[in-house]
Image (tube, grey):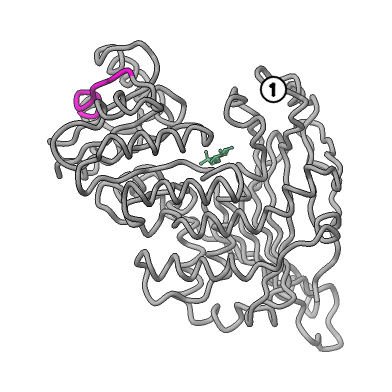
Amino acid sequence: MKERLAIFGATGDLTARYLLPGLAALRAGGHLGDGFQLIGASRHDWDSDEFRRWAAAQLDRHAAEFPAAAREAVVSSSSYRRADVTSPAAVADVVAGDGPVAAYLALPPAVFPAAVSALHEADLPAGSKIVLEKPFGEDLDSAVTLNQLLAEVVPEQAVFRIDHFLAMTTVQNVLGTRLANRMLEPVWNSTHIAEVDIIWDESLALEGRAGYYDGVGALKDMVQNHLLQLLCLVAMEPPISLGERDLRDRKLDVLRSVRPLTDADIVHHTRRARYTAGHGVPAYVDEAGVDPARRTETFAEVELELDNWRWPGTVFRLRSGKALGIDRKEVAVRFRHVPHLPLGHGGEALPNVLRFGLDPEDLTLDLTGIGARASTFAPLTLTAQIDPPELPAYGRLLLDVLEGNAALSIRGDEAEEAWRVLTPVLAAWSKDLVPLGEYPAGSAGPDPRRRDRNG
Ligand code: BG6
């Protein structure tokens, strides 16, 4: 394969922790040809040698599991240009060369419009692609504007809006398990399923990312993209194929079916909070680079319902928080109680829960069986480990970019619908209709306000 990847914002955290290791994985797996070229661009006043030294150090640090030869090959395929992404001349210099280029914007969302306009003027070679990191825009209006700008530069199939959750094996497994097992699909509806928790609770705190995170917050960082995408995979109708059109059409249907939230819904069915000091972690507002006046939430929870034939009455709870006491990263599908239990048994028959563990990657099913004392119900859990993926999520996505397969990236209309779902929440939160709560770092988060929805 002869491909060129130009990363704008190439000296940042994303390149160091995900893109360079992803490329090393591709190289180790024989997916990158000798003609592959990596062009790093950023505002640092570096030359190619300096960039290569930095890239080698990052690969040693974040990709030590891949053979040294693969890491070295990535480093030696790279070069560097100093560039201001808002300058058309500088951008043209970065992308100039033989054949198509994939322009990867590893940049804050506020810079996207200027960078895309610069790419437009740079006159990209035919067959080129543009890759963007979420959030795609800062709200619905800016997402629409960004999509219009992109459409002037490359066709939609050449736009890769990256959501690395979609390339995680267990996330893929949500859809795979649903559709490849005859016993699941007949009960995959609101007659049998009471609620679905889509949870990404992290013990990690801000990790020095205030420059990106402050002012963005948990709702835009996690719920608007990763968690809504998971909702799509859980709730979608079976697609005809996993090709980009079928998969993305069915995901769009789910987003379009989300019942619009009223202010009253938002008051009762959303929560936001930020962490205070605890367990050796400073309060969010005291983290370097944070402006407390932005009132950025580090915890967000939203309950949604879908207006369609399959899901009336099922509650989908999407939640993510940072600096929490326990990592809980899963999709938990909770079934309703059985309609009748024969008299004569002791104990309680708890509802079945099917859990897709996202990190660590596993699959568990909570059942009820008969315990050691005959005629007494007892919980029974089946657990399966998932084989480690051949490629890390970013390796898989970079391969898709290089091969031109957009199925796992977000289409423009999906990005816009996801903003539509959350626009009323953003508006209500900005008017303080929902108080910004607090929770100590290392705790279980703000007080739950959970209703029993189990029918
Ligand atoms: C990123 C978010 O997209 O996903 C982070 O910006 C979050 O805030 C991260 O921590 C979680 O994914 P991973 O794969 O880095 O654990």
Percent position of residue 446, x then y: 83, 42
- Residue 327 or 146: which is nearer the viewer? 146
The residue drawn where x is 63% and y is 44% is 220
* Of residues 196 and 181, the one drawn nearer to the viewer in this rendering: 196
Where is 295 relative to 306, above or below?
above
x and y percentages locating residue 281 in the rendered image: 72, 23
Q: Nearer the viewer, residue 342 or 57?
A: 57
Ligand 1 closer than 8 Å to the CB at disc 1? no
**Helix, strand, or loop for circle 1?**
loop
In the picture provided, is 176 more to the left or to the right than 205?
left
Q: Which residue is mark 1?
A: 290
Residue type pointed to by label 1: Val
Q: Determine whether, in the image, residue 114 is placed left or right of residue 25.
A: right
Q: Is residue 366 magenta?
A: no
* Residue 196 point in image, percent of width and height: 68, 64
| 31 relative to 154 in the view: left or right | left
The correct choice, above or below, for 92 with respect to 351 in the image is above
Splitting the image into 4 quarters, where does residue 257 fall? Answer: bottom right
Residue beneath the point at 52% across and 60% down = 384
Q: Is residue 432 left or right of residue 298?
A: right
Q: Position of residue 331 (x, y in %)?
A: 61, 58
- Magenta segment: 73-82
Name the quarter where the C terminus is drawn.
Answer: bottom right
Badge 1: few (under 14), some or many (20 or more) residues near its Cα, within 10 Å?
Answer: many
Where is 19 relative to 406, above or below? Answer: above
Quarter of image, ligand 1: top right
Rendered-image quadrant of the N terminus? top left
Task: State which quadrant residue 82 falls in.
Answer: top left
Q: Tell me what residue is drawn at x 22 percent, y 37 percent.
A: 4
